[in-house]
Image (tube, coloured by chain):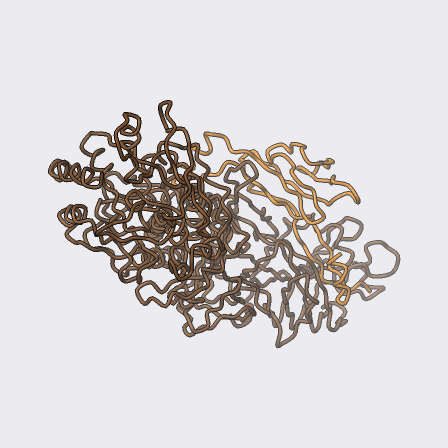
Chain colours: A orange, B brown
Amino acid sequence: MKSASLILLALLSVAGAPGSEAQTLRYMGKDPDAQTGWIEVDGVPSHVAPGVEVPAWGSVTAVTDHELIVERRRSEAEKAKARREGALVHDAIEIHIPRDIVEFFPGGVGQRLRQ
Amino acid sequence: MFFVRHFVVLALSVAFLAISCPSAGAFNETTHRLINFRANDVALIDGDLSLDAFLKGSVGLVSGILTQFSDLAPRQSDIILTNNAFEWLLVGATQEDEPFCRSARHFHDPLRAWSDAGLNSSDPVSAALIAAVCGAFSFPSSAIWSQRANQDDGVGGPHSWLDARTSFATALTSVAQADRDRAWANTFRSIGQVMHLVADASVPEHVRNDPHILESVFQKAGLSGYGNYDFWVEQHPELPFSGAPPFDRSILRQPTNVPEAPVPIARLIDTDTYTGAASGPSVTLNPAIGIAEFANANFFSEDTGNRNLLGRNYPYPAIDLLVPSLHPAPSGPNLRRYYKKGADGGLLVDPVLAECVLDEAARAAGLPAPGTYNCVDENVWRATANEMVPRAVDYAAGVLEYFFRGRLEIAAPDRFAYGLSTYQPGNTGGFNTLRFKVRNATPDEDPGAAGRMRAIVQYRKPAAGVDLIQNPFASLSAELYFAVSEIVPDVVLTADFREFAFTFRPPFPANSADVFLMVVYEGPLGFEHDAVMVGGKDLLEPDPLDVGNATDWECVDGVAYQVSDFVQYPPFHPPGQTQRDVTGDGNPDLSGPAVSHNTFTKTFDLSQSTPMPSEANFDQYLPLTSFAQYGRVMLLQDQPTYGAAVLSRDVVQTPSGAVIPNDFRVAALQGVYNDSILNPRGQIQRRITASIPYRGLALHHAILLVSDSTLPCVGALNLKEPDLTRIPSVVAAP
């Protein structure tokens, strides 16, 4: 008999990203002992490292155990539009994409989380 | 010479009165701006923090000292409407001399009682002239003027230390950004004006009751006299503005015992250590000394290098102990007779006094008895400025350091979450209570008595009320919004953390971003009765904590099955009902759906031990969660990654009736960012944590009940139907 168990669903995919052309992005996780990791863009896996450009999302700036961080510069036109609309004007967007699934650890081994 | 000089003053006085008021301030405008400019470089708040870092870290000003503030109050036409914080300090540097008669309050004679230490010219000509223009013969000492409760007596408006304090409290606790901006502008301007007063006390004329207005009268009349220290310093930007031995900051923890100037900021000017002949000047070489005392004891002013018949005579520098010292005259080929300090116990200064230029000419012409009157000239001014200008910068920095010294530290409450609130549809709820710990982190100073405290939340709103969980990329308001809590009275802070609850009426919105928390204390600190302390913490954004049940779908070998459909997947009863054996091995592969009872979720700091959720220890409680249901609470916390512990008292698998008791799990969750930071390139960067769609919801993270075999394909279930339905949660007491 199978049993139900709690799992943590951290992030499965991303929608409504900065640009209208944005594609869904999943961060699958980091390679052990390296600053590289795996993502899936519209279901297509690829290997990323800091500096790699992810189309429609931006340039990868960090690959960690918990999240992928990409940065996207805003164009002058985007900034001018924000200014016209009375919105906060910023020069860049840093997007944090948590790792897609983080499995729960059974209670009592919380120490593992801190390592 | 004495009478010649005053004849000139009299002759010019009519023109002087007719044209305008001369600037009789000490340093001139440019010098004061440079001193305040450099003081900001030197100042280290509490010994370790620049003003820029303080503004960024403690009061949520992302651009720090470059943050722009508009002063919308009535103003003089030469003040620019909008300046950054740093520029307002420089505005203060110049405005303390406007109008002219304000500068008559920039004198402090450290050898007099403070009540009698201001300008009170004993030279009848100067006294008459000043009285004619400014309406009085005597004026308050700069040490007292800097702390006068009401400076608004027709000489440029209220910009004392007390006004700076009031403006600071207003800047921190006002709800409207325009009110805060105006108060910030006034804060920095007023601090700049107090810095001006301290810098003026480095000028010998200002600490030896010497009005020195002759050159100003000349200049205003379009003429040029011999010059004076103020004009000469202004014309020599190559002078050192740093390198002085720093004053001993402990003087700022000495009471003044002067009711009119109770704040120890006055000790920057006068510590009452140097008492003239009684103490001797050697005490001024100790760094725990006021700058007026140092200037008075070690330098001559324009008209105090001679024994006066009518005016005050100062014991030091000791004229009788001066030693001749020849130096080239400032211009021309001649050597001029100078004097350097002898062994009077004070600072060695060479030259400290000169023969007057007309005496030099008389001596060169062979006229008898030259050298009857001592003067100060360019060489003396240079020797003075080399010592005093860097000191002026250091002491002016002391104003900044002391003003912003009051530091509070914020820490998460014992329960971890600063705020907990019920989620409202459309994310329209809010937090009406924040709970956190506060301690006094000001080095070496305690409040000693009770004050009052408020919490302030600074945030931005999304454009057009867009739900930031649904669309975290929505534009944010350029304008900052502020929620100010009710006052917590009678607070006695110590160096140990103490937890407080702050109530917000109305609540501040859960649908907000760029959240920065401040706590402001108003009350006693050390010897300052009306101090302001502030602490800040950049919280992460309001965070939807979702706990739910998704056991209606299961995966086996990558294939999804809707197990809540009992028509397709009835309970496993072989040989008639074997639909749940999808692998054909004779055993059921599908176990759901399940129902969980009494699920408690508790968030925690991952650096702390893992808590056990229970009826008495939870953030969210769900009495019963059936499949395709979830509960949500809004959480406010301060960690990029935090822990969540979940306990379900019973998980019942519906088809079989099997019960899993006390299922306890722990996980790390990512905090939610949606803020603006300054990136390493000095640009404003928006930081956003993406949200995701999952079965009709938008969420940042969710704790979901699923079967073991489903884990590998959870990602394939995010578009499955039915949508998850939100059920009411019990939220812990705020």
**Residue B416 location (% of width, % of height):** 60, 65
Along the horizontal axis of the image, is B148 left or right of B34?
left
**What residue is rendered at 56% in x and 45% in y?**
B688
In the rendered image of this protein, does residue B512 appear above or below residue B100? below
Q: How many marks?
A: 0
Left or right: where B204 falls relative to A100: left
Q: In this view of the protein, which residue sits in the foreground, B731 or B673?
A: B673
Residue B368: x percent and y percent? 26, 32
Residue placed at 33% from the left, 46% from the top?
B92
Identified at 22% across, 45% down, the residue is B99
Query: In the visual, does B565 lie left or right of B213?
Result: right
Q: Give the answer, above or below, for where B562 lies relative to B506.
A: above
Comparing B269 with B534, the one in front is B269
Of residues B540 and B445, the one nearer the viewer is: B445
- Picture coordinates of residue B409, whole percent (x, y): 53, 62
Position in image of residue B178 (x %, y %): 33, 50
Q: Residue at x 42, y 74 (%)?
A: B490
